[in-house]
Amino acid sequence: RKSSQLLVFGYRPLTVHPMRTIPVDPSRVRILCAGPATPATNMDGSARLSRDGKPLFNLPILVLADGSRPEATSVRLPGPFPVIAELASIRFTGLVAWFWQMDNGKSGVSLTASEVHPEASGRTGAAPTR
């Protein structure tokens, strides 16, 4: 896999290195919805789309593991999907961690999933639109 150039307005071009993916097994943690999903956008403000043309959303979550502090993060996934009540238990299908690094030293981990499902006790509502 090749590196690619990312052009950021006002900055020198950054080389984004190929991402490595690791499937995530969430069976040992509890995941809660931490708020409403928001549309994922490109740097120019346009809607970010999945490879098959579906709009992408960022869903904030809390990850709870026995003996650890709760971790707040977000998962990017294609819509539409049910709106999930805040602090409702959820589970993901196809949850994957993406490791990324740029030439400027910035690096991180992003989470993506193919679907989100509220647990049986969670309340749901209308699908997000945009």
Image: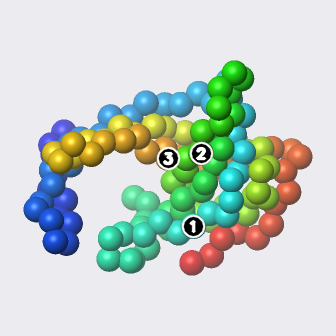
Q: Are marks 3 and 2 in contact (CB under 8 Å)?
A: no
Can residue 93 be seen in this snapshot?
Answer: no
| Residue in the image at 26% along x and 42% along y | 101
What amino acid type should be assigned to the residue bearing mark 2?
Ala
Res 14 quadrant in image: bottom left
Closer to the observer: label 3 or label 2?
A: 2
What amino acid type should be assigned to the residue bearing mark 3?
Thr
Circle 3 residue? 112
Left/right of residue 74 with respect to residue 48 in the rendered view: right
- Vertical placement of residue 87 versus 49, above or below: above
* x, y percent for residue 50: 43, 60
Disc with the residue nearer the chain's start (3 vs 2)? 2
| Residue in the image at 38% along x and 77% along y | 45
Disc with the residue nearer the chain's start (2 vs 1)? 1
Circle 1 residue? 38
Circle 2 residue? 72
Query: How many marks do you count on the picture?
Result: 3
Q: Are marks 3 and 1 in contact (CB under 8 Å)?
A: no
Quadrant holding the N terminus: top left
Closer to the observer: label 3 or label 1?
A: 1
Looking at the rendered structure, the secondary structure element under dot 3 is strand
**Res. 90 mark:** none
Mark 1 packing: few (<14 Cα in 10 Å), some, or many (20+)?
some
Can residue 22 be seen in this snapshot?
Answer: yes
Q: CA distance from mark 3 to mark 2?
A: 15 Å
Quadrant holding the C terminus: bottom right
